[in-house]
Image: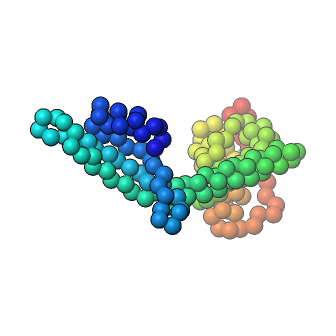
């Protein structure tokens, strides 16, 4: 029991029920985690007569949760390391994915180039619209979304080696 047996019995007497996780020992000696529910049964005078107990083995669920937590911690550590690498680079880097060019990571230089903070998970179009930023060519003509180098790479798998795009911030 997570607390003393006496405390559980007192709660059962007072509330008429108790639920929590218990550690049981299997016949082979292995430990089993169970989700346990206890309900106090009373007779017509209100005197306790029995306890109905239902236990469900959740050992595999707990092991899976522990594995997921470990994987999440490892992923966060790797992401932190990658962010540190990107931040050490002198230029602007924005790592995007998917058909909507959603931001995964950006380094310190990206906000300077864009003139605004791009939130992770936000699509490129939504970011540009939110901050009134446009992508223009050398003649100051707005480049349509599907012609942006980033979108051509993501949507068509095109490798863009040389392409000039100008980021036009609201202030010009």
In the displayed structure, 38 sits above or below 27; it is above
Viewer can see residue 17 = yes
Q: Nearer the viewer, residue 6 or 154?
A: 6
Residue 131 x %, y %: 63, 36
42 vs 38, left or right, is: left
Residue 6 x %, y %: 40, 35
Displayed quadrant of residue 156: bottom right
Residue shown at 35% from the left, 37% from the top: 9
Residue sitting at the far left: 44
Quadrant (top left/top right/bottom left/bottom right) for the C terminus: top right
By what rule are the colours in the image chosen?
rainbow
Residue shown at 45% from the left, 49% from the top: 22
93 vs 146, left or right, is: right
Residue 145 x %, y %: 62, 54
Residue shown at 47% from the left, 55% from the top: 24
Residue shown at 15% from the left, 40% from the top: 43
Q: Nearer the viewer, residue 168 or 58?
A: 58
Q: How many marks?
A: 0
Viewer can see residue 138 = no
Q: Nearer the viewer, residue 109 or 150?
A: 109
Residue 57 x %, y %: 43, 59
87 vs 64, left or right, is: right
In the displayed structure, 108 sits above or below 68; it is above
């Amino acid at each position: 029991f997570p607390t003393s047996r006496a405390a559980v019995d007192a709660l059962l007497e007072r509330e008429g029920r108790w639920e929590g996780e218990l550690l049981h020992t299997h016949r082979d000696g292995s430990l089993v985690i169970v989700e346990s529910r206890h309900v106090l049964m009373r007779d017509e005078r209100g005197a306790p007569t029995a306890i109905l107990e239902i236990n469900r083995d959740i050992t595999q669920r707990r092991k899976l949760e522990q594995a997921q937590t470990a994987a999440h911690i490892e992923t966060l550590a790797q992401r932190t390391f990658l962010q540190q690498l990107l931040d050490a680079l002198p230029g602007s880097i924005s790592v995007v994915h998917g058909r909507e060019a959603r931001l995964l990571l950006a380094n310190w230089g990206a906000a300077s180039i864009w003139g605004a903070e791009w939130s992770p998970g936000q699509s490129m179009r939504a970011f540009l619209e939110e901050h009134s930023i446009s992508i223009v060519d050398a003649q100051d003509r707005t480049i349509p979304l599907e012609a942006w180098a980033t979108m051509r790479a993501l949507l068509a798998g095109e490798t863009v080696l040389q392409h000039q795009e100008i980021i036009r911030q609201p202030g010009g």
